Image: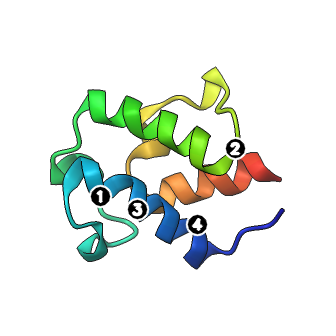
Amino acid sequence: MSVSQPETDGRIQSLLCPLIGNPDSIARHQDLRELGLTSMQMVNLMLSIEAEFDLTIPPSKLVPANFRTIESIESLVRELRH
């Protein structure tokens, strides 16, 4: 099932909300670590993304660069869903 970019971004932002507060003001390209996302929160985010999008992130994709921005997360989700 294909998911549009705005829908994917919205779902990612909702996952970020409990981790870093109000994600609505986050630019797609903004580094989430600069907003205070810790390594433990990044692990929680990875698990939440797997559950939210019903996918498994392979070990080769479990790298910080894939979870640095909303844009990079959206790209990863799109790649794994196709």
**Mark 2 or 4, closer to the camera:** 2
**Mark 4 or 3, closer to the camera:** 3
Q: Which residue is mark 1?
A: 17
**Cα separation between marks 4 and 3:** 10 Å
Residues tagged 4 and 1 counted as in contact (Cβ below 8 A): no
**Cα separation between marks 1 and 3:** 5 Å
- The location of residue 37, given as percent across then percent down, is 23, 43
Q: Mark 2 or mark 1: name the one nearer the start of the chain.
A: 1
Q: Residue 8: give its label.
A: 4
Residue drawn at 35 percent across, 36 percent down: 42
Identify the amino acid type marked 2. Asp
- Neighbourhood count class around disc 4 (C-alpha, 10 Å): few under 14, some 14–19, many 20 upward: many
Q: Which residue is mark 3?
A: 14
Q: Quadrant of residue 21?
A: bottom left
- The location of residue 22, given as percent across then percent down, is 22, 67
Identify the amino acid type marked 3. Ser
Q: Which residue is mark 2?
A: 54
